[in-house]
Amino acid sequence: MTSNARPAVMCPARAGRIAVDQPKVLASASLVMPRRNAGGRTTSLRTRQAAPISARRTGRAVAVFASGQKGYKVALLGAAGGIGQPLGLLLKMNKLVNELSLYDVAPVTPGVAKDLSHCNTPSTAEGFVGPENLGKALEGADLVVIPAGVPRKPGMTRDDLFNINAGIVKTLIEGVAKHAPNAVINIISNPVNSTVPIAAEILKKHNVYKKEKLLGVSTLDVVRANTFVAEAKGLDVATVNVPVIGGHAGTTILPLLSQATPNVSFDAAETDALTKRIQEAGTEVVEAKAGGGSATLSMAYAAARMAESVLLGLSGTSVEECAYVESSIVPGVDFFAHRLRLGKNGVEEYLPIGPISDYEQKALDEAVTILQGNISKGREFANE
């Protein structure tokens, strides 16, 4: 099975600056991650004051240094793999986490936990190996993050991973249903377009399904879109925010460049080239690693950001993120990635897509057809 910071650790690509124009957000400590407040201004959370209503992600860093809020137990399933180990480190550094439970089938897992336990951060870290210990790893978890599964290799698509990873996710979600039925679940294991519907079906069988608590992590698509747009236009990545909708594989990934902030323009050729680069960015990494792995570090970063957003929501600060969830926002598909508002119960609000360009509408229509097949494939597997 393979697959957040001392308060001053900076995670965004250009992390040397922290904005201080909105100092009131959350009286709890957290990983340094980017957000905007409800008014669109960037924020730095160096305060012990109470939170305002919401925060919105951009590339700019956010630091939360105060104490006194509830910490959370996070269970990381697939903790010994290429995504799991760096993600475990980022979670260990996140002061919203007070207990980190690390699970894998790999014998090295207790060593990973021991290694992380030496980091002088307030949370504990404990390792659990094998199916017989899955329940112990999950008991009392507020958030379950699942990067477990085999990685992509050269020439592989996400669908090529299906037969192996689908079985892994099914088994792990069975455990979540029995031992952590109230936890928010973040699924990273590919193909996300199918593994999230699998998880939903398994949870339904156990009568514990809450759609607002099951999220497919498509955050890496947003992270990449922000980075690539900033590079293309010479912008400070800390100011860039690009919604990415659809799914989390190939042409189902649809960056809404027309909605990018700050407002930027691309001609038709630029739009097409940049959209395709964002869609195929995972392949870009696989090829660059020449058979030595897939996008593990950037995925760990993106997953840490998403985990932090969920924990901030549980803490009482509403945060906007894009994620792949059960949603009726687009007719014809039951699961779709789009902007959400996270809060104390997981997803609090399903935000509309908004106006999109003709190019984006055509791509969306094509993505819907592919997603329908991905979703059906997952459901059929879960119900075999």
Image: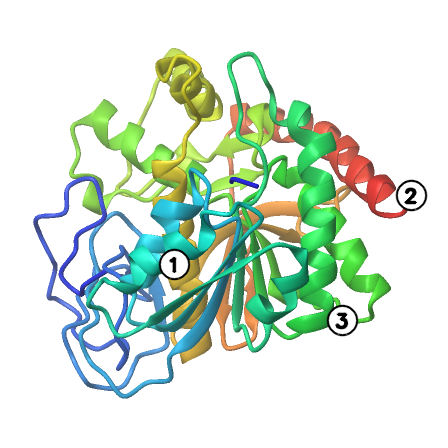
> Residue at the spot x=58%, y=24% of the render?
251
Q: Which amino acid does label 3 sit on?
A: Val
Reply above or below: 216 against 36: above
Residue 162 shown left or right of residue 97 in the figure: right
Instruction: Please state the horizontal and vertical placement of residue 256, each as a whole percent of the image.
Output: 45, 35
Q: Where's the N terminus, which quadrant?
A: top right
Label 3 residue SS = loop
Q: Distance between the residues labelled 3 and 1?
A: 30 Å
Which disc number belongs to residue 208?
3
Of marks 3 and 1, the one in the foreground: 1
Crowding at dot 1, Cα within 10 Å, few <14 / some 14-19 / many 20+, comes out as many
Residue 36 shown left or right of residue 103 in the figure: left
Instruction: Please state the horizontal and vertical placement of residue 4, each as a whole percent of the image.
Output: 31, 59
3 or 1: tag closer to the N-terminus: 1
Q: Distance between the residues labelled 2 and 3?
A: 20 Å
Instruction: Please state the horizontal and vertical placement of residue 229, each as a whole percent of the image.
Output: 29, 30
Comparing 24 with 330, the one in front is 24
